Image (cartoon, helix red, strand yellow):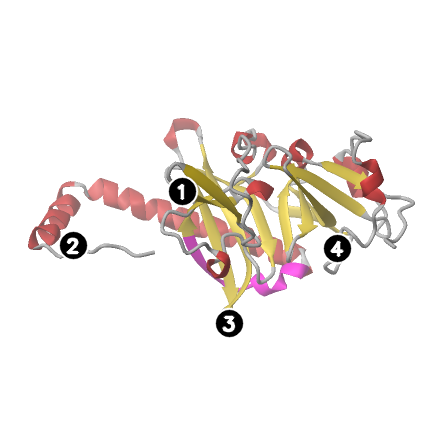
Amino acid sequence: MNVTRRLASFFAVSLSLLLFVSPVRAEEGKGWDNQFQSQIHAWMDAIALRDSQFKQWKNAQVDVQTLGAGQHQWLVSVSKSGQQVGYMVVGEAPSAKGAVSFVLLEYGVGEYILFDDAFAPRQIAAEPVYDGFASHWLITHNPSTQMVNAKTGESYPAEFEASEPVMSALAPDELVHDSQQLTQTRILRPTETSPFDQIGWVHELNAGDDVSWAQLWQTKGSTPVTLTVPLHHSQVLAPFVVGSLHLWNDQYPYVGVWDEGLRFVPYSYAHKVGQFHVNETSSPAE
């Protein structure tokens, strides 16, 4: 991103005056940053401690960027020895008496992260828009717009339109908050698996069966579990193989699906936007 730099002499003077007359505001900004950094590292340590798939997160470095203007969401890129090993998406939630509270919207492990610069559109007007599986870059070509998938860099047809956001509408008690710990984990599929290796879910798309968190947790490791998610007003159907399950503080469930690495989203979100298929008698694709 190109940033225009103005080097007028009054800028330095104005900045000095601002810091002089607003020491409290400057101190508040520093306090917010310290709290944010402390929280994301606490979550990283908690995940690495409980799930061996995240072992590279131990003592890893982070880079933070803002997602969208005024959205109070941040992408945290996690790297080790110069290589990306995962990411987190963190939001700021309203809390009592104006105190800052952070929530964990999504996290993943692997070298391919959301909004990776390697897949970013080169257009200046591309804006990152976060909404779980529907996350995308929005490219504005007045009077039209176009979306680019935030995980793969795939361009959607220009006539596709984004659905109403779901992730930002989740209740605070559906998300992991500050200082909460990862207490239980289950690995169902330890390696990347294509949803088309087992196609039993295709025949269940219109069944309308509801799969609870308890049913997911009790699923046998040998049983394929698929999550299908209609995106952008059902113009795209995205199938994912469920690889892992996380439970925070024994009450906040997150589902990890294979998508160029493992990505974890709140179960409540996945349950709202998609459908789980537990394929007890699934047969291989021909």
Residue 98 screen position, x and y as percent: 37, 30
Provide the residue designation for mark 4: 194
The relative height of residue 217 versus residue 78 in the rendered view (above or below) is: above
Q: What's the distance in space between the residues labelled 3 and 2, CA to CA?
A: 35 Å
- Disc 2 crowd rating (10 Å Cα; few below 14, some 14-19, many 20+) is few
In primary-sequence order, the first of circles 3 and 4 is 3
Q: Is residue 62 magenta?
A: yes
Callout 3 secondary element: loop
Residue visible at 34% across and 56% down in the picture: 1
Are circles 3 and 4 on residues that touch, CB within 8 Å? no
Q: What quarter of the picture does the C terminus occupy?
A: bottom right
Provide the residue designation for mark 1: 140
- Disc 1 crowd rating (10 Å Cα; few below 14, some 14-19, many 20+) is some
In primary-sequence order, the first of circles 4 and 1 is 1
Provide the residue designation for mark 2: 6
Provide the residue designation for mark 3: 81
Could you tell me if residue 237 is visible in this image?
yes
Residue 198 screen position, x and y as percent: 83, 51
Q: What's the distance in space between the residues labelled 2 and 1, CA to CA?
A: 26 Å
The relative height of residue 6 versus residue 70 in the rendered view (above or below) is: below
| Direction from residue 68 to residue 22 in the image, left or right | left
Q: Nearer the viewer, mark 3 or mark 4?
A: 4
